[in-house]
Amino acid sequence: MALEIKQQLKLTQQLVMTPQLQQALKLLQMSRLELLQTIRQEILENPVLMEETEITEIPEEEIPDVEKEIPDSEMEMLLDFNWEAYLDSHSLSSSYPDNYEMSESAPNYENFVQARSSLYKDLLWQWRLNSPNDRIFEIGKYVIGNLNDNGYLNASYEELSRDLEELKPTRDEFESTLSLIQQLDPPGIAARDLSECLLLQLRTRTPRNLIAEEIVRNHLPLLKSRDVTALAKKLSISKDIVIEAFHVISELDPKPGRTLTQDPIYHVIPDAYVYKVDDDFLIVLNSEDIPTLRINPLYRTLLRKKKDLNKEAQEFIEKKMRSAIWLIKTVQQRHKTIYRVTESIVRFQRDFLDNGIQYLKPMVLKDVADDIGMHESTVSRVTQGKYIATPQGLFEFKFFFTSSLESTQGGSVSAESVKHMIRQIILNEDPKNPLSDEQVANLLKRYHIKIARRTVAKYREAMRILPSKDRKKNF
């Protein structure tokens, strides 16, 4: 069959997101701090946009016709559109300016090392002062770059030597370099496993506890299970000496890198407050520090007098005017959407707000989405990184969306409520005879909760509670 080239018209539907809708979606899912930073930046960059101290409405008759170019249907589309499907194949991140285009001559960012935390910087500064020569410095620099956030060395000699092909360090050079780095602060840094990490710290102590070193070097499993009797028998020493060694080991840091890599603590500011007023709940959005925006009247007047403007100035003002009006509308819509979602959560979770976490009901995004007539992906994004202050405490919006477990009496119970019950059961157990996951599951059945042992284990691990054999206290 002969091949031929021909033109053919084809009508297709394709999802297209305008820059304005991209901005609207970004604002919708921003945290309060991110929104404030964005607004401040927009005020700096857009002379048409200004801040006022008191809330004033923008009179419709004073807004030029340019506003008509932003139809309300686009804002409705923002709320009803299935963003989840769209975002699966489109990224909204803006790491580069809008007008930035990658070219063949641009650097390949995949070859760049990600910016390291202060652990890397601090160790590198110490290493510059302590490395014996340039060659060892370069080897050590690469070793430091391969430490994880806990301060452990992730790479073996073979892996590092392949990466350091130009230097071709010998195993002796690698070991001596690593030994020097392990003398830096904090103690225990650059260890290859937990035993080495603890030993490095024990060797810096004066006087040295040789029993503790022996336990860490050769008996970690017994240390983990806190089996004082077995250790005393193995080492032919008294239980008191073992307990003393345990106390010394307990003062060590198994993750020494955390002291320099822990994230800073941020104070959470609620996006919404829920107050109990008589028999009802009052919802108040937190608008503190969020600027009230308006159009600069100077540019509004200039735009009316188009004859006094050249074409370039007119186009500039119109462009900035459209951007300002869109931002004002989008921020207002964001506030309305947060309020509606909060209102729906309050309707679903009245029992929790009145009585506490054991009354938290199972709820999914679809429940709220159906209640307020929005798509669940929109609800997901508007609750992202936002917090609500309630009579029961401060919670992330996502806290209220929890899976359910079956009750033996019919109906269902919130997974978060079950976690709370598991925590309370373990807190009240006999520390010398802790409950197994199977026993916890059986206890929950007394409360008409149908739950498997593996589910108890999963919830326990999610709450960072040790298994029963590790919770047992022998002393």
Image (spheres, rainbow, N blue to C red):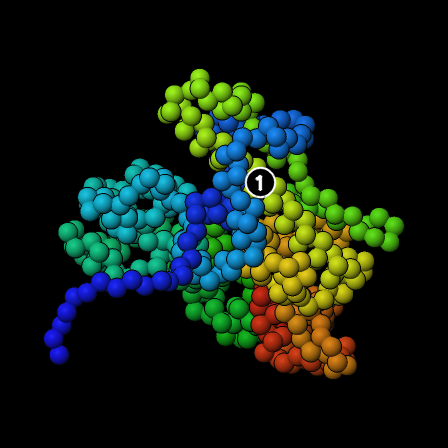
Image spot of residue 100 (x, y percent): 31, 41
What is the number of callouts on the image? 1
Q: Residue at x 54, y 30 (%)?
A: 64
Q: Residue at x 31, y 37 (%)?
A: 129
Q: Residue at x 65, y 26 (%)?
A: 53
Image spot of residue 376 (x, y percent): 58, 61
User: Is any part of residue 208 visible from this angle?
Assistant: no
On the rendered structure, is 362 left or right of 222?
A: right
Q: Choose between 44 and 48: the one closer to the eye.
A: 48
Split into 4 quadrants, where in the image is the C terminus? bottom right
Q: Choose between 44 and 190: the one closer to the eye.
A: 44
Q: Which type of secondary structure does the marked residue at label 1 adopt? A: helix
Q: Residue at x 88, y 50 (%)?
A: 278
User: Is any part of residue 313 visible from this angle?
Assistant: yes
Q: Choose top left, top right, bottom left or bottom right for residue 99.
A: top left
Q: Is residue 211 above or below residue 71?
A: below
Q: Choose top left, top right, bottom left or bottom right for residue 31.
A: top right
Q: Choose top left, top right, bottom left or bottom right for residue 170.
A: bottom left
The kind of residue on which mark 1 rests is: Lys
Residue lying at the far top in this picture: please name it: 308
Image spot of residue 23 (x, y percent): 48, 44
**Residue occupied by mark 1:** 329
